[in-house]
Image: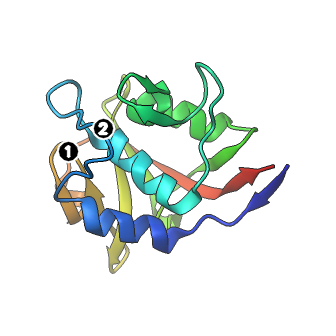
Amino acid sequence: MKTIEYNREAAVSYAERWALRRNPNYYDFDGIGGDCTNFASQCLYAGSEVMNYTKDVGWYYNSPFDRAAAWSGAQYFYNFMVRNESVGPTAVIEKIENLQIGDFIQLHDGIEFYHTLIITGFSGSEPLISAHTADAYMRPLGTYTFAKPHGLHITGVNVW
């Protein structure tokens, strides 16, 4: 297995195109838990082009009924990203001020992760994010209310 570079520009370009609307190739989870992590995964896939089809602990999407929990669940997304040692994207926990475009921020309420955001720009040092559920494009992170933001810096994409 080798690690290739994550295409941050492709992930951000995808976010720009789909932040305020829905890609018909993916199910819209609004109304049944939210679409934020589904959208984040779509952006991540646009920048990685690799899914991990490992049953129960992978990260993939074929249909609303054939997908990994990590594709659309915020806590599962976090778990996959920081623990993945197999095929697919990998991440490390990073301070918000050290993140780059194409990285992710997950909001935590003190008990669990509940929202996943992609960084699509900066205003000075403040991340500008894009997200689904409460649809946003280039929204300042400081306009959100949260107990603690967790940064996920994408380090690369594992491939065979």
As drawn, the residue found furthest toward the right would be 1
Helix, strand or loop at mark 1: loop
Q: Identify whether 135 is placed above or below 38.
A: below
Type of amino acid under label 2: Ala
Is residue 98 rendered to the left or right of residue 39? right
Q: Identify whether 88 is placed above or below 138.
A: above
User: Residue beneath label 2, please?
Assistant: 147
Q: Where is residue 89 in the image (x, y as percent from the top left)?
A: 62, 49
Q: How crowded is mark 1: few (under 14 residues within 10 Å), some or many (20 or more)?
A: few
Type of amino acid under label 1: Thr
**What residue appears at the point 73 percent right and 50 percent down from the top-left corner?**
158
Is residue 96 rendered to the left or right of residue 36? right
**What residue appears at the point 30 percent right and 38 percent down from the top-left corner?**
147
Q: Where is residue 92 in the image (x, y as percent from the top left)?
A: 63, 49
Q: Where is residue 32 in the image (x, y as percent from the top left)?
A: 20, 24
50 and 94: which one is in front? 50
Q: Identify whether 34 is placed above or below 144.
A: above
Q: Distance between the residues labelled 1 and 2?
A: 7 Å
User: Residue beneath label 1, please?
Assistant: 145
**What residue appears at the point 53 percent right and 65 percent down from the top-left corner?**
98
Label tally: 2
The picture quadrant where one finds residue 48 is bottom right
51 and 117: which one is in front? 51
Q: Do the residues labelled 1 and 2 touch (CB within 8 Å)?
A: no
